[in-house]
Amino acid sequence: MSWCLNREIGESGDGGADQSSRWMAHFSYACARYTAWLLVLLLVYAMLPGAVHAKPTLLLNIKSSDSAPWGSEAAAQSMSQLAASGAQGGMVVAFAWQADIHADHLQVGAGSDDSHLRLALRQVRATGMDAVLKLHVWVPSAWAGNIDPDGSATRASWFADYTHLAVHLAQLAQQEHVKAFVIANELRTLQDDPHWPALILAVRQHYTGKILYAADSVEQAERFQYWSLLDAVGTNLYPALPENQEERRQRMQEWAQRVADLSRRTHKPVWVTEVGIRSARGSLEKPWESPEERQAQTDLDLQQHILAEWLQVLGAVKPSIRVVAIWCWYTDPDAGGLTDTDFTIQNKPAQQLLEGGCCQLQ
């Protein structure tokens, strides 16, 4: 730019005070002029479709396979495959366990002890991907959203147990340089409980990364009252979808718009902490339904097309939606495959959707 400034300022004269003043005036004018043009160009560029509004960061929820525990060569191979496919990060799922929905005691789930979680986070990061830690509660033959400890004293005891576990994982996440910690997932019955502020504060005292809660749906995310205490809005996406593609795209856009509206109301970015669908026929009506709940024939095209549509629709509402995390991926590198009807996208056409990932977590 020096030649432009020289042209704007002119050649030097006798070096007197008047000349210097004129130089300074010309220089100030030139700077203001070029700054204005730069701002105009940036504004025009920002308005171009896809110019600045990059795709959301793409993560995969990762579950440990019994045949390939964290720390094994098989798990390392699976993480390398995930990174090579284009994912920017892995959301390592840690499980707590309780006996039934009315219990007031939790314990660490199998494969989610400190040693395995450290191995998990390190194996994810060793590939160059970002690592996120996400806490789920496992209840045999029940959904975590129905957890409802009996009585106020029992509920207080449950939250004391849960806070102790969350703080412990927060310390581990801090030591392992985890970018974000999802402190709870789909706890619908408990999400309005007044114990959450104290729990979140306790976690913040030990962890400096991003802290989130994952609501089970957009409706529940809209009802959650503690977003101001967290760093982002977290929501899972498994709404029933129409068979007709045009109607389905419209429905998806409506959900995405509600997510964007929630982002504006809360002044928080949004993480879609789970979005997924089985590679099984008839999965549109109940995308959340597991293979244990319903047997069906394989439909690889359905999974690929629905996830592609979701990624296109959600990517269009950047910057409101910062992260999209697909459900799911396993530590077994041979998981999934062309006859599989589960949620994983491994070794299926849907895995190709990971290509062209854009960025790391900030």
Image (cartoon, rainbow, N blue to C red):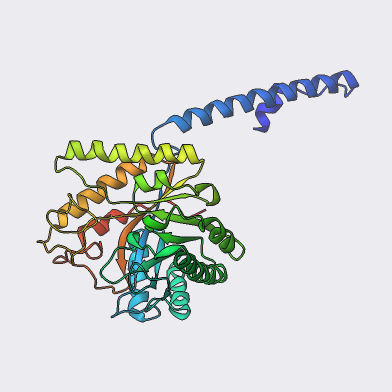
Q: How many marks?
A: 0
In the image, what residue occupies the spot 71% across and 21% down?
Answer: 29
The spot of residue 324 in percent (x, y) is 37, 52
Q: Is residue 41 placed above or below 180 in the rendered structure? A: above
Q: Is residue 108 placed above or below 262 in the rendered structure? A: below
The spot of residue 27 in percent (x, y) is 74, 25
In the image, what residue occupies the spot 28% across and 66% down?
Answer: 142
The spot of residue 310 in percent (x, y) is 28, 46
- Which residue appears farthest toward the right when viewing the image? 16
> Is residue 80 visible in the rendered structure shown here?
no
Instruction: Say left or right for 115 vs 72.
Output: right
Q: Quadrant of the N terminus?
A: top right
In front of the other: 282 or 29 = 282
Image quadrant where residue 200 sits:
bottom right
Image quadrant where residue 185 sits:
bottom left
Instruction: Say left or right for 144 vs 11.
Output: left
Image quadrant where residue 294 sits:
bottom left
In the image, what residue occupies the spot 50% across and 67% down?
Answer: 166
In the image, what residue occupies the spot 17% across and 40% down?
Answer: 245
> Is residue 123 visible in the rendered structure shown here?
yes
In front of the other: 337 or 18 = 337
